[in-house]
Image (cartoon, rainbow, N blue to C red):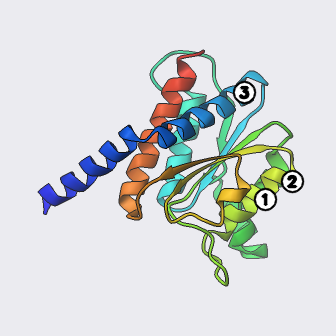
Amino acid sequence: MLDELLVQRKLLYQKISESLEFKQQILNAHELIKKTINSGKKVLILGNGGSAAQAQHFAAELVCKFEKNRRAIPAIAITTNSSILTAQSNDDGFELVFSRQIEALCCPGDLVIGLTTSDVTAGSSHSLNIYNAFLAAKNHGAKSIGLFSQKTKNLLSLVDVAIIVPATNTALIQEVHQMIIHLLCSLVESEL
């Protein structure tokens, strides 16, 4: 069993390391993050479940440091304030939990980064909060990056840059999302 799991990961990492499209997606995301930082704007990061934890991790790497001592980068994981999350969900539904915070915190020129291993689905509230967050970002003049998977279809048109992990297994997608976060942090820090 372990050998099979390791082979799956090896094949996925080999596929993405050989993909010029995947590398270009990361470079495009880096350029957008760099432009945001150089403009003195902030980064708002979000996701559900494991992706919420990754959003928090990403924000911490930007605010504190990844590998290098440098100036702090303004970044907020909008997945962490339990009072806002529960009040908004209780009063108006979970599908607005991120868009409401974007309405409050987002300014033109800011960057919204959303992580999901899936997609918004018609007739369901699944990932609807991610969909609404990207709409709110667009309405507030912010740019957006989506860390997605090959399951993601309906969210693609809402973001300026999509990084698509060529997998459908949630655990594998999340592992690659973590690698992408670290790659982006390394690229950002290399220029500060």
> Label 3: which residue?
35
Where residue 35 sits: x, y (%)? 72, 27
Where residue 40 sits: x, y (%)? 78, 25
Tell whether 184 sits left or right of 157. left
Q: Is residue 173 above or below residue 37?
A: below
Which element type, helix, strand or loop, lies under badge 1? helix
Q: What's the residue at 60%, 31% (across, down)?
A: 30
Q: Residue type at mark 3: give it.
A: Lys
Q: What's the residue at 63%, 70% (across, down)?
A: 120
> Label 2: which residue?
139
Q: What's the residue at 56%, 61% (across, down)?
A: 48
Which element type, helix, strand or loop, lies under badge 2? helix
The reply to whether discs 3 and 2 touch (Cβ–Cβ < 8 Å) is no
Where residue 95 sits: x, y (%)? 71, 70
Q: Is residue 182 above or below residue 154?
A: above
Question: Who is closer to the viewer here, 14 or 75?
Answer: 14
Where residue 151 sits: x, y (%)? 51, 66
> Label 1: which residue?
135
- Image quarter where the N terminus lies is bottom left
Tell whether 20 sits left or right of 162. left
- Image quarter where the C terminus lies is top right
The reply to whether discs 1 and 2 touch (Cβ–Cβ < 8 Å) is yes
Task: Sort mark 1 into few (<14), some (14-19) or many (20+) by Cα contacts within 10 Å.
Answer: some
> Of marks 1 and 3, which one's residue comes earlier in the chain?
3
> What's the distance in space between the residues labelled 3 and 2, CA to CA?
19 Å
Q: Residue type at mark 2: give it.
A: Asn
User: Would residue 65 be visible to someone looking at this image?
Assistant: no
> Of marks 3 and 2, which one's residue comes earlier in the chain?
3
